[in-house]
Image (tube, coloured by chain):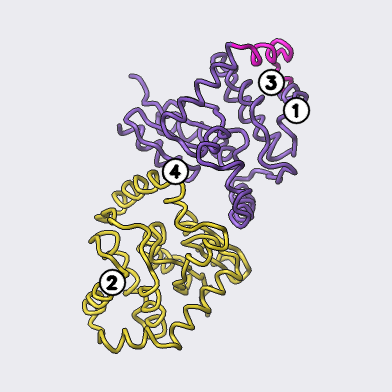
Chain colours: A yellow, B purple
Amino acid sequence: MTKPVLDFWYDFASTYSFLSAMRIAPLAETEGVAVRWRPFLLGPIFQSQNLTTSPFVTFPLKGRHMWRDMERLTAEMGIGFRRPSAFPQNSLLAARVAMAGMDKGWGEDFTRAIYLAEFCDGKTISEQGIIAEVLGTLKLPVEATLAHALSDDNKSKLRVQTEQAQKLELFGAPSFTTADGEIFWGNDRLEQALRWAKRS
Amino acid sequence: MTKPVLDFWYDFASTYSFLSAMRIAPLAETEGVAVRWRPFLLGPIFQSQNLTTSPFVTFPLKGRHMWRDMERLTAEMGIGFRRPSAFPQNSLLAARVAMAGMDKGWGEDFTRAIYLAEFCDGKTISEQGIIAEVLGTLKLPVEATLAHALSDDNKSKLRVQTEQAQKLELFGAPSFTTADGEIFWGNDRLEQALRWAKRS
């Protein structure tokens, strides 16, 4: 029997996407749902809402709550969270590499490793050296992988994926979408989205 | 033994405050936490963030998701939700009446009844006639209650409460605050806020 599918849309700059990336695999396994990991870029989507940066920067009180919320939630999850010095980070390179990894079976592991580097180890994920380090820990050939990630073909795949997110009218991350057209926004909706995917 | 206290800050225009108002009493009972119901006005708080209306209006895609999210969540809760024709509604009069009721023991019941009128029966809660109807169903003396709600003393109490919300740097509703200075924002944090209040 084919498993029901849930699409998981995430941006590497997004704190709550980090939480979902760390939680989704075991939860989906329990529910018998297959997850399609879909890195995309929030930048163009925020721009089309006339936001020039993250709402957590535009609205400082909301931003302050988000950081404290992250501390409390990661403590409950047993994750050693550390607020990065820069936020939001430029997620373009990481998203391109993740995109390249999805067809090859290491995209999920890369995604989790990048999020941990960013939000636990305080690394700047826009730096090619940091991406290379993470690829190294995954035992992947660094130069060939980066060359593939930066190929026109792979860049175009990420662009198309971001355009699909816009067509679906996603407005934030993480978002979860189902085959029957539901959009669930936010890490807090992960469980509900999985249940929905399962029953539909 | 004195129960630990959780402050519950809500605005009658807020859809997610509605959900918390319907959920908080039994959950707090189970956790052994006393809830202080604190109606306030989001308007001045949004204004100080340079928002002229609800973010759900300013950002239409976020608004569209919120309505669908409300449909899904209320269905799970067994509440017959109906999207009101006007949003956000002017919540000033309802907040004044709720404020008047808090000292007298009927504030909580009034709060739930107003939310149900607004989000299940499609009523316009800025209308004095609707408020009067709700007071009638609660067997309260309509004219005397409205007169008290509109007294300078009671108006001032609501103003002070809204100023307290601003001093706490609340930025949205519902919010939950604890004696040790934590802010939990959103209906999704109700359970966590109760657990925090209990242990602190």
Residue at image location 37% in from the left, 83% down from the top:
A149
Mark 1, secondary structure of its residue? loop
* Nearest to the observer: residue A181 or residue B156: B156
Q: Position of residue A3 (x, y in %)?
A: 51, 76
Residue at image location 66% in from the left, 40% down from the top:
B88
- In this rendering, the count of numbered labels is 4
Mark 3, residues whose alpha carbon is within 10 Å: few (<14), some, or many (≥20)? some
Residue B65 falls in which quadrant of the image?
bottom right
Disc 2 designates what residue? A127
- Which of the chains bears the disc numbered 4? B
Q: Are marks 3 and 1 in contact (CB under 8 Å)?
A: no
Q: Magenta span: helix, strand or loop, mainly?
A: helix
Q: Amino acid at mark 3?
A: Leu
Magenta range is B135-152
Mark 2, secondary structure of its residue? loop
The Cα–Cα distance between marks 3 and 4, rounded to whole angstroms, is: 30 Å
| Image quarter in which the N terminus of chain B is found | top left
Q: Could you tell which of marks 3 and 4 lies nearer the N-terminus?
A: 3
Disc 3 designates what residue? B138
| Front of the two marks 1 and 4 | 1
